[in-house]
Structures are given as structure tokens and as C-alpha cells.
Amino acid sequence: MKQSMNRLVWGIAIGVWAVCGAQAQVAGTEAQASRTAEAWASAGAEDARPAGTPQEPDLRAVKEQLVEFQRIANQEITQAFANPFALLQDAKGTYLPGFGAVIHMEVNLHPLRMLSIFGQRTTERELQKAREAKLKRVSELKAWLSGLLLEHGAKLTEVPADLKVAVVVDLFNLPSESEGLPTQVVVETSRRAVLEAQAKQMPVEEFEKRQEFLEF
């Protein structure tokens, strides 16, 4: 009788231990699952990007588009101005993260006649005429730059629309003719403005107002 009682007590103890162990295992599994879910949610929150976040441009594609823009700029500027005119440095483009595309070139808007060791020195009249011609061509240059951006700026499709496209033109002047003449003309605008103007969503006059010119 005593032995039967002992076996009953041990059986009850083993059953209680098994139940408690199973409950502890379930609780541990649930806690682990909860921690795993929290970790995934946290990782998702850290890695998630707001909808519409622009991707980084393909720099190789940007370079290819800049090369084509350079070619067009070199060709059209030499056609825009009658001689005497000199393109001293071909257009070179680069991409600046956070700003956009920048194209640079150097020109002489109205070179003076070539002098030889046997030729006469440049006269004051020639210098004055060259200054007047260059001042007039500065205005023409700004108009040409505006048209260049309007016609071809939208083709820089790898440049994000909220960034800018700028063209910098260095103006070569001799010391004897530099008085009152700018040495650089810069024009810049957002590529979004170019896209809107190209899509006829913005009048040309409004597009011109959206450009920024710097002349100094």
C-alpha cells in the first residue's frame, strides 16, 4: 500500500513538472517570437525610405549625356557668332552631387586682328571698337545660353529634376581692352523648369525669368 502511494505521488510530481516545463517552453518561444518581430519591425523602420525619394543618378549615364551636351554646345556656339570669334576651350561638363550639372567653356567674343613683328600696333580706335563689340556680344551670349538650356537641358535625363543645370563661360580679354568688360558669364536654372518649358507648361518668358545670370 505504501509503495503504491509513493508511485502515485511520483507520478503526480512528474506530470506537474512536465506541464510546467511545457508552459515555460511555450512562454519562451512566444517571447523569442516577439523579440524577433520587434527586431524586423525596427530594421524595416531604419531601412524604409519615404515614397518618392530620388535615387542616386547613374554617373556613367550622366557622363554620356554630358559628352553629348558638350558636343552640341561646341558646335552651336561657333555657329551663333560670326567672325571674328574664337572658341578657346571646348565645353567640359561635370556632375556635382546636390547641385546638378555644370558645363564650362572659354571664348573670345571678338578677337583683335593678329599682329606681326612688321605690323602696326593696335590703335585706340580698334580697342574701343573691340570693347563695344564684346559688350554687345555679351547680351547675345546670354540669349544663346538661355536657348541652349531650353533646347537641350531636358536631355540631361539622369540629372534629378530638382537639381540644376548651369553653364559657365570664361571671357578672354587682353589687358588693354579689359576695362568695363566682364570676364565670366554664368547662367543656371533648375532642370524642372526646363522640363516644364519643354512640355509647354511654362511660357518662354517665364522660363527666362526662372534663370539666374551672373556677370562679372
Image (spheres, helix red, strand yellow):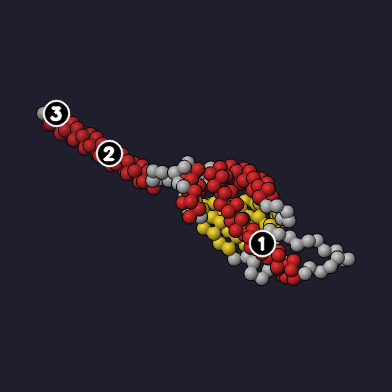
* Label 1: element kind: helix
At 59% from the left and 66% from the top, the residue drawn is 216
- Is 64 drawn above or below residue 124 in the view shown? above
Q: Is residue 20 above or below residue 4?
A: below
| Lateral position of residue 35 relative to residue 212, left or right | left
Dot 1 corresponds to which residue?
A: 134
Q: Secondary structure at mark 2?
A: helix
Identify the image quadrant of the N terminus. top left
Q: Position of residue 140 (x, y in %)?
A: 61, 56
Q: Do labels 1 and 2 touch, CB within 8 Å?
A: no
Residue to which mark 3 is pinned: 4
Residue sitting farthest toward the left: 1
The amino acid type found where label 1 is placed reads Lys
- First along the sequence among labels 3 and 2: 3
Q: Earlier in the sequence, mark 1 or mark 2?
A: 2
Residue that label 2 marks: 30
Residue 135 falls in which quadrant of the image? bottom right
Q: Nearer the viewer, mark 1 or mark 2?
A: 1
